[in-house]
Amino acid sequence: MDNKNQLHGMPQHPEPYWREGIDFPSFPSLNNDIKTDVAVIGAGITGITAAYLLAKEGKKVTVLEANEILNGTTAHTTAKITAQHGIIYDELISHFGLENTKLYYDANQEALEFIRNLVKSENIHCDFSDQDAVIFTNEEPYLEQLQKEYQAYQKLNIDSTYDSEMLLDLPMKAALTMKHQAQFHPLKYLVHLVEKLKDEGVSFYEHTTAEDIQEGDVSKVITRSGHSVEADAVIVATHYPFYDGKGFYFSRLHAERSYSVAVKAEKDLEAGMYINAEQPSRSVRYTQNEAGEKVLIIGGEGHKTGQSENTLKHYEALQSFSDEHFGIQEFPNRWSTQDLFTLDQVPYIGKITANSQNIYVATGFRKWGMSNGTAAALLLTDLIVGRENRYADLFTPSRFKADPGVKEFIKENTNVAVELVKGKVEGADKKLEELNLDEGAVVKVNGKRAGAYRDSAGQVHLVDTTCTHMGCEVEWNNGERSWDCPCHGSRFDYAGEVLEGPAVKPLKKVNEN
């Protein structure tokens, strides 16, 4: 396989560990106009879980996916199911108060319990295991933060311990443990749910890109092919909302990429899920492959999308960390993922705007989509069926917290303005004829900025580097062979097709002559 060819000692092509050996069901694209009770846009953990819950409520559900199901962010996770989301609870208490912070913890803990109970009741073979979640630090400045976080845990009655000793064969000065969390194989879990949904009459359509929504008493989802889906309710679970609904999500979210590697190691990891407090981030957990061998999943190296000049260096840093501390025997997989951050660290889950009748959104899970995505599906189901939910006000996308909202709003939108201007004035990276095989770069074609990629057969693919979302200039991502927008996180493959929103239209093609 090409993926096993080695580049700097790592797999040549990115492919998430979780997709290996999985038999995915396939579905047709939508080729006619249809009506449904609920249209779910996006077939990741949020969309599939919501479809499962709503079908149980007797709703007719239709799921639309722009690519293939379970090939987005959910397939690129480290798959920890936990309410421990980094050092966050002390900060949330200061911004939201103790009561609302307890709601955030409870929502994520209930999501974990939902998955745990469903795995048991449905007998889902998804490598689910109870694990403690640990934040550790090896830097003095973070000791005080970790101690404050432990105090926040105590206020919230979170089952936890604080240790000033090494829990793992890694340097650490202190560790904060949240007890009774979990990990699993996310795609084994979700493929099981998809098979159940097929039996219950839920319709799935792949390669069906939703481009717009016409809101009304009955809303209409318009697809790129021109076909439509009429629905009493629409859930936008596309990671970055493809439809903004005048909610100005582009000004209230920012995108970051992070990286993961799967390695067979000389040293074993007996138990636990670990993440450090400082930067660069390091996340460590284990799983077992089909042969019963332990595989380490090691992640980290986050940065804003489109704002890293050499993305391969992030894989190399994780490779170096893995080899130094665990000893690499085999290096079968590497992959990256995209995460969305809200202004106040709490996801946006609920009606897309305060005035929206029946359009719902779930986004901004930071790096914790397994718990937050499940919590979102539970909340949205209650909202759609008209059931009261105690988490609705906390997660409502219409909220605005002056602290830290104003500061983050100014910072993020200043960053967007800087990147917009920078992209317009930057010159070419190199000349078109200088491109090597399997290399991409910004070039000049007929005196204008263009993106060029020369594939392994020597064919050159030229695209206009102006992002089709809001006009920023995309940059080449050498680790993923993609064009990434530094403003709002849209990503396109080397030929210009959309990989990640908010963009819904591909980059324009450029002719060399």
Image (tube, rainbow, N blue to C red):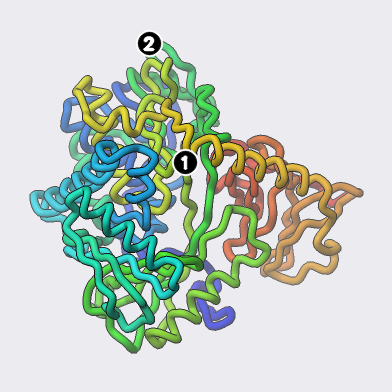
- Drawn side of residue 461 relative to residue 296, left or right: right
- For this orientation, the residue located farthest to the right is 447
Secondary structure state at the residue bearing disc 1: strand
Specify whether 120 is left or right of 162: left
Q: Position of residue 116 (x, y in %)?
A: 15, 53
Q: Which residue is mark 1?
A: 342
Q: Residue at 31% across / 25% down in the picture? A: 38
Residue pictured at 31% horizontal, 28% vertical: 393
**Residue lying at 51% horizontally and 34% vertically, measured from the top left:** 242
Disc 2 on helix, strand or loop?
Answer: loop
**In this picture, residue 483 sits left or right of residue 188:** right
Which residue position is annotated with label 2?
217
For marks 2 and 1, give the one nearer the viewer: 1
Question: Residue 241 shows which numbered tag?
Answer: none
Is any part of residue 194 visible from this angle?
no
Residue 263, image x, y percentages: 39, 78
Determine which quarter of the picture holds residue 386: top left
What's the residue type where badge 2 is placed? Asp
- The structure residue drawn at horizontal position 42% and vertical position 41%, both measured from the top left corner, is 206
